[in-house]
Amino acid sequence: MINHRPFCFPKSAGTMVHFRVDALIICCIVCSGSGCGIALGFQHHSATPRPTKPTRRPTASRYQQTFGPNNISVRHRRFLRYRDGQNRDIDEHALADNTCLRASSTSSAETDGSTDARSEKASDESSAKSGGSFDDFDYMAHWYPVTFARDVPYNKPTKVSLFDVDYVISRSPYVPKAGADPPKRIPGSLADDEEQVYAVLDRCPHKSASLSEGRVIPSCDDDGDVSSARFQCAYHGWSLDGKTGKCADIPQVTASERRDSLPRSRLSSGNSSRADTTAVPALIQQGIIFLFPGGGLEKALSYPPPPRVPELDEPGYRMVPAVRDFPIDWSILLENIMDPDHGLFAHQSKPFDLYTGSKDHPQTVSEEVTRDGKGVILRASVTAVDKLTKYDRERKLEKKDAKLAKKLEERNEDEDDTKPLVATSTFYAPNHIVLARKDDKGKVVSQTVFWVCPTGTGRSRFLSTFVAKLPPFFPLPRWLGHVVLNNFLDQDTHLLGTAQKYVLDAEAKALAEAEQNGAGNRKDGIMARRSLYVYRSPTEKLQARLALFFDKTLPKVPNRSSALRRVVGISMEATPSRELTLDRYEQHTRICPDSMECVAKCSKIRKASKILSALAVATKLIVATSTNPTELMARINDVLVGKTMAIILGVLAATSHLATKLKNAFYFAYPEARRDKDLQKIPFLWGDER
């Protein structure tokens, strides 16, 4: 386990934007016009950048000797604070000594109406100007979010995936020492950064059974405090230490015999054994569990930790985390989140237009390469004003009333004199996205935060959280946010599923062709997205850069090449059904304890409503047909008259109906009929007649 306080985005403070009750759902989902539509972090605040502090390279030996190769004591919660005479923290702006910043901006003439050749030429020229800035990007030099800590029960194995590799994780509660202050917990996270978290490969070295099917045995020190945890395989009872991955117990072999009987691998060094498994560094930060698959603790310490959301560290803010697994490749999902052009049509949502580009408001893209090329940050900015929707309103108005249209144009000219906000989209490769709107001084007005976990080729896990400054007496139920979110996600998830087969097939064929031609050097990249996609929109300057990034770096993703070789020609044969791509139960409900609890309660309410209805009817029949009614029966008969009986049965029926409807919201709920109904909203945002 690693506990620390890593670098942050610019710190900000302020108050939440006030919403109308009927608009709360909309703003929680589409406030920033994000791709995939999950704008769950709508905030209103100001931002004051934190001063940059110098970076010092860590030394892991002291931590390893005391706490094991993959875990750090809760006493060392600061990730990179060292005993060198000064306490220093890693900051976002001090990722490395050699950090280069490059910016490229294309004029509207270069983006509007460009040909395929011009788009490809612009992409190649941009790549040449950046000096091949993606060549040294390293996917194994980053921390990856795998799940929210609150969704992992204490001392129970939970399976997660990363780059087509399965891991088993577990967490243990943090118990402060006597007299110590209790840890500060983010409202809504239900987890502490000081908690212990363990992660090993989800494979027992004995006969390769999944450790996640077994159980967790806490290990305590002499004081009775939990110091580690053992993953016990349910097949033969082998136990493996969660900190080190070493085999801790084989029930069939006595402790005295184990040392001599464990087989030693000739390929291993030191005291490692074939009976051991691989442990990976893990940490909990702001309620999210992160894994570092690129090596042991010493290597993990040499790289920056994941960024924090500064609002979550401020009093009054709470989080409402959301999670969903998609049968969509993580690279496609990332592209979709960074694509605001689809919002007006796939989601029928106007706020997306604030992030689009136009001839009058061109998109500017900048690139920052960090850590000698192992890290990349892509930023796009554009004036946060209506563009497509404004044009559509003017055209519609001209057809109806020319005079009114002229007055509207004059009013728009007056509004243009004011300084509008700037909409920014920032991609912290390879898994983190921040969408924000800022004023002319760079202060954040609204912000949305996303994490995308690359679970495997053709798969992804989406993580997001609604961050808000809400009063303690107004807790937003997590399951309610999930119902709203899933409705929104369904609108474009199936579209991504229909496109995925072409994207992965193009990538697989490009990779096979490169290897066949002897150009298999992974730094050379491939021509998959750049040859498949056709860019025309002024907003797609960032999309073109993302395509280049993925074409350059995806061949270096662990296990991806072998997975793609298996889908060449196969992925083109099958188009996934809506029931598969939009299966809410498998993708969300099953992995979210709050949603599962809501489903269980709905089932109980339905059952109770039916039982109470039957009892009411039976009681009425008994007291009405009794030949010798008692005084109590007479009173009951007087109460259960026709009108009262109808009200009781009506309330119970309505309760059962609402419970059924809410329960169904956690299963497949977006058929073609509902899609067609949503599509009817498009002409109100973008008229069919031009």
Image (spheres, rainbow, N blue to C red):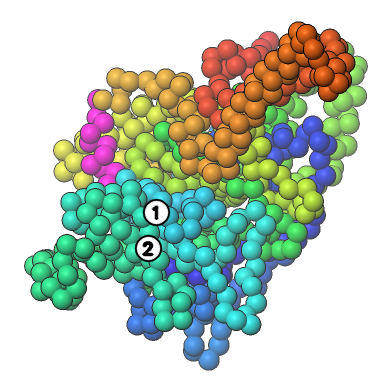
| Image position, residue 669 (x, y; %) | 56, 22
544 relative to 647, above or below: below
Pointer 2: what residue?
217
Give the label on residue 47, or none. none
Q: Which residues are magenta?
A: 555-569
Mark before the other along the chain sequence, 1 or 2? 1
Q: Residue at x 15, y 66 (%)?
A: 253
| Image position, residue 202 (x, y; %) | 30, 52
Check the picture and name the quadrant holding the N terminus: bottom left
Answer whether residue 685 is visible to the viewer in this image: no
| Image position, residue 116 (x, y; %) | 43, 28
In the image, taking residue 353 as reference, residue 503 lies left or right, namely left
Check the picture and name the quadrant holding the C terminus: top right
Answer whether residue 111 is visible to the viewer in this image: yes
**Quarter of image, res 24:** top right
Pointer 1: what residue?
157
Please tell me whether residue 566 belongs to the stretch shown in magenta: yes
- In the foreground, 618 or 632: 632
**Quarter of image, res 350:** top right
Q: CA distance from mark 1 to mark 2?
A: 10 Å
